[in-house]
């Protein structure tokens, strides 16, 4: 998430009431999660296990809960609670704006696009040309939809990320300030839910087709010409490369990559990254041929036991 204009390190420290290490005028351009940071971004870290990763990332400002040696060319914001202060920055630069009408005046709707009754389209939404938005679709603020996109009834684009920090008094949610971006020629079925990125974008690639009742987690990127069948659940920060086929009721863990042209059979459970060009099945998902061969061997176990008894 980039700020509307550059800020200085001192200005950011004043917003969240923290001390800092670095020049007062050190430039701060935005804030992002670790997997999408760029120079000029703030990244937060609140556990020693991840200090090194954050300090060596592309981010040039690290919001951290311990004063450590500052890497050359970077700056530190020292906070007793980086998670809380990252939320403060999101609230400051991307505050929630309530709606007072079904289609915001700031939304931009393309030529020949049809929006059926009872839809909600939030602030700064862009919908391209020749789209068809069926009844009761909810499109949250800042969502970007390309040309020739069909979205069926009851689908929700842009709900907040399922991202929480456990505290003694309960769970504290990381506030989402990112977007959903749907590319050209995408088809999204009924009752799908696609969460916005925390600071970046959740992306549905060009010409991909989603069946009904699919959940896509925050910051996940789906490539071009993917087919995803009903009741699939994709966790946050997953990369699904081009031309992947995922059949019904597949579930995945977060922060993995599914390679191009992979095929995932129904009800598979994906617990790690999968190479492209192969077919997978089972939980945890394995290459289908190997998994089916194992099933054959398992079925033969009673026969082998009976043979052993006769000896």
Image: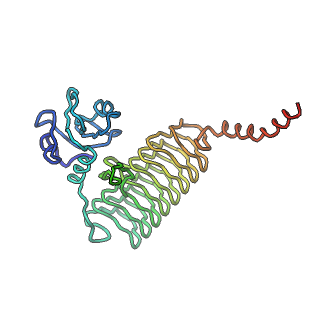
Position of residue 137 measured from the top left corner of the image (x, y, whole percent): 41, 66
Question: Residue at the right extreme?
Answer: 310
Q: Residue at x 36, y 50 (%)?
A: 164
Please state the horizontal and vertical placement of residue 2, each as a whole percent of the image: 24, 46
Whether residue 246 sits left or right of residue 122 in the image: it is right
Number of marks present in the image shown: 0
The relative height of residue 159 versus residue 75 in the rendered view (above or below) is below
Give the image quarter of residue 307.
top right
Q: From what the image shows, is residue 306 above or below residue 232?
A: above
In the image, residue 152 lies at what x, y percent? 47, 64
Which residue is painted at 60% across and 38% down in the image?
286
Could you say which quadrant of the image residue 46 lies in? top left
Q: Residue at x 55, y 54 (%)?
A: 229
- Between 166 and 28, the residue placed more toward the observer is 166
Q: Residue furthest bottom?
A: 117
From the viewer's perspective, tell me whether residue 112 is left or right of residue 73.
right
């Amino acid at each position: 998430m980039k700020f509307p204009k550059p800020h200085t390190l001192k200005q950011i420290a004043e917003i969240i009431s923290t001390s800092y290490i670095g020049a007062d005028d050190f430039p701060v351009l935005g804030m992002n999660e670790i997997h999408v940071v760029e120079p000029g971004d703030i990244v937060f870290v609140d556990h020693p296990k991840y200090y090194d990763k954050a300090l060596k990332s592309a981010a040039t400002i690290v919001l951290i809960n311990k004063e450590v040696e500052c890497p050359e060319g970077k700056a530190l914001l020292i906070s007793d609670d980086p998670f809380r202060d990252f939320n403060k920055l999101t609230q400051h630069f991307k505050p929630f704006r309530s709606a007072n009408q079904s289609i915001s005046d700031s939304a931009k709707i393309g030529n020949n696009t049809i929006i059926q009754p009872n839809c909600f389209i939030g602030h700064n939404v862009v919908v391209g040309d020749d789209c068809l938005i069926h009844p009761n679709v909810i499109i949250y603020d800042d969502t970007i939809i390309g040309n020739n996109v069909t979205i069926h009834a009851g689908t929700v684009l842009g709900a907040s990320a399922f991202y929480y920090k456990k505290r003694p008094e309960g769970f504290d949610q990381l506030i989402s300030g990112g977007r959903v971006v749907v590319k050209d020629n995408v088809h999204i079925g009924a009752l799908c839910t696609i969460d916005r990125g925390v600071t970046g974008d959740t992306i549905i690639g060009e010409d991909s087709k989603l069946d009904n009742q699919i959940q896509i987690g925050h910051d996940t990127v789906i490539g071009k010409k993917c087919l995803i069948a009903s009741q699939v659940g994709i966790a946050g920060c997953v990369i699904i490369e081009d031309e992947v086929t995922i059949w019904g009721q597949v579930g995945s863990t977060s922060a993995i990559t599914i390679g191009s042209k992979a095929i995932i059979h129904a009800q598979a459970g994906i617990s790690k990254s999968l190479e492209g060009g192969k077919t997978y099945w089972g939980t945890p998902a394995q290459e289908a041929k190997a998994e089916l061969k194992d099933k054959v061997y398992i079925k033969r176990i009673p026969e082998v036991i009976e043979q052993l008894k006769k000896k």
